[in-house]
Amino acid sequence: MNAGQQHLLDLYRAAQRGEAAPPAPGTHTVRTAREIQQWHHFRAVVTAPADRLPSRIRRAVRSAATALLRREADATGPRDGAPARVAS
């Protein structure tokens, strides 16, 4: 049963019971999407920059990539005549 058929069934039931008709499917879709967008904008303003998910993901990827590159460079040694890194 799709949304249109369910809506027709709900209309029939409401008419049989003398109740108010339910809203048609998709009636509040635009309003709901706008409210979700406003919520995301609000969270972006309220949340500290370091606590935002994209920042945390970016930081984690950067540190993991740096660790892998360091491990790879240490394992293979100097390349193409580049000077060896001095461990500190």
Image: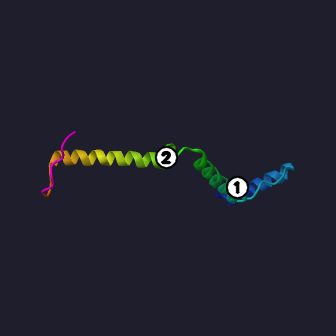
Q: Are marks 1 and 2 in contact (CB under 8 Å)?
A: no
Residue 83 belongs to the span the image colors magenta = yes
Question: Left or right: 66 with respect to 77?
Answer: right
Callout 1, which amino acid? Answer: Gln
The residue tagged 2 is 53
> Which quadrant of the view contains residue 63?
top left
| Residue positioned 65% across, 53% down in the render | 38
User: Mark 1, mark 2: which one is toward the viewer?
Assistant: 2
The residue tagged 1 is 6
Callout 2, which amino acid? Answer: Leu
- Circle 2 — which element? helix
Residue situated in front as seen by the camera: 41 or 10: 41
* Magenta portion: prevailing SS class: loop
Which segment is the magenta one? 81-88
Question: Which residue of the protein is positioned furthest toward the left in this rendering?
Answer: 81
Residue situated in front as seen by the camera: 8 or 28: 28
Local crowd at mark 1 within 10 Å, few (<14), some, or many (≥20)? few
